[in-house]
Image (spheres, rainbow, N blue to C red):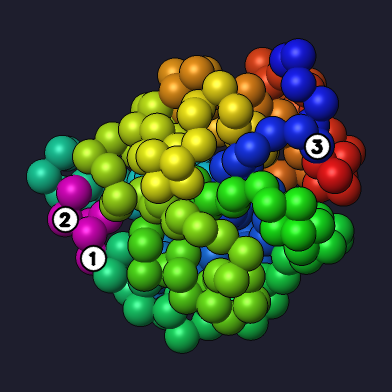
């Protein structure tokens, strides 16, 4: 990384765990879906370790964690996952910003980057409808020129496709973009795309210390970008 953090032409931001603490509402939706189908719920602290790969993976990890006996076969597992996913999304849409909120310094940082003329994008594995809903609810949509979600490309993060799509939509070369995330999924996506990447320390990193994710740097606050 030879460019100062404040000197990039574009910034790609992960959403959950990087810009917004969405775990309380995601955890509530997960427990609603699980309990409706007769499974046990989980503490939010545990659910935080599963956030970041998309709702379908979140549900599969929850089922695996409690070793659901009726989810052992591939056919049963897929049917159960889809049923839980429908209930998860239905509940989450109704409660998407009950407790979710931007992390400290997010609004100020995005405002300053916009004023400088930097182009900003969201690159998340969250579904498009849910991503736009939470961004609208928290009044964050206006800061971004591109919103790339888990269903925007055939291959979501950690594949390069979402980052490359965001760069095209921003009209910024990948070498002039900084990816800001919180997990190995983000780092792998950035590496595959060929852009620099930094991580925040307190996001949803699946139990791995931010310093061990392989990013170019760990930033203590988004304010470090300005």
Residue 164 at what x, y percent from top left? 40, 33
Whichever of labels 1 and 3 marks the residue nearer the N terminus, that label is 3
Where, by quadrant of the figure, is residue 101 drawn? bottom right
Q: Which residues are magenta?
A: 78-83
> Is the C-beta separation of discs 2 and 1 under 8 Å?
yes
Residue 36 at what x, y percent from top left? 37, 75
- State the separation of the CA atoms marked 1 and 3: 45 Å
Residue 177 at what x, y percent from top left? 59, 32
> Is the C-beta separation of discs 2 and 3 under 8 Å?
no
Circle 2 is placed at which residue position? 79
Label 3 packing within 10 angstroms: few (<14), some (14-19), many (20+): some
Label 1 packing within 10 angstroms: few (<14), some (14-19), many (20+): some
Give the camera-side residue of 194 and 129: 194
- State the separation of the CA atoms marked 2 and 3: 47 Å
Circle 1 is placed at which residue position? 83
The residue lying at 31 percent from left, 63 percent from top is: 85
Q: Is residue 79 magenta?
A: yes
The residue lying at 18 percent from left, 49 percent from top is: 78
The residue lying at 39 percent from left, 52 percent from top is: 149
Q: Secondary structure at mark 3?
A: helix
The correct choice, above or below, for 56 with respect to 25 in the image is above
């Amino acid at each position: 990384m030879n460019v100062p953090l404040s000197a990039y032409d574009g910034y790609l931001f992960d959403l959950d765990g990087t810009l917004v603490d969405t775990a309380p509402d995601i955890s509530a939706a997960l427990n609603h879906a699980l309990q409706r189908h007769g499974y046990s719920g989980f503490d939010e602290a545990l659910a935080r370790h599963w956030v970041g790969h998309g709702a379908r993976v979140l549900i599969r990890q929850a089922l695996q964690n409690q070793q659901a006996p009726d989810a052992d076969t591939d056919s049963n597992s897929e049917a159960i996952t889809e049923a839980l996913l429908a209930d998860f999304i239905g509940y989450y849409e109704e409660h998407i910003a009950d407790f979710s909120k931007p992390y400290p310094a997010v609004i100020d940082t995005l405002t300053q980057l916009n004023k400088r003329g930097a182009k900003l994008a969201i690159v998340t594995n969250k579904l498009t409808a849910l991503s736009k809903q939470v961004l609208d609810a928290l009044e964050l949509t206006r800061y971004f020129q591109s919103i790339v979600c888990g269903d925007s490309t055939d291959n979501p993060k950690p594949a390069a496709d979402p980052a490359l799509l965001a760069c095209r939509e921003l009209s910024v070369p990948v070498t002039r973009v900084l990816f800001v995330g919180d997990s190995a999924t983000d780092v792998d996506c950035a590496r595959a795309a060929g852009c620099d990447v930094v991580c925040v320390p307190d996001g949803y990193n699946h139990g791995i210390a931010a310093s061990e994710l392989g990013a170019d740097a760990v930033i203590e606050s988004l304010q470090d970008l300005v």
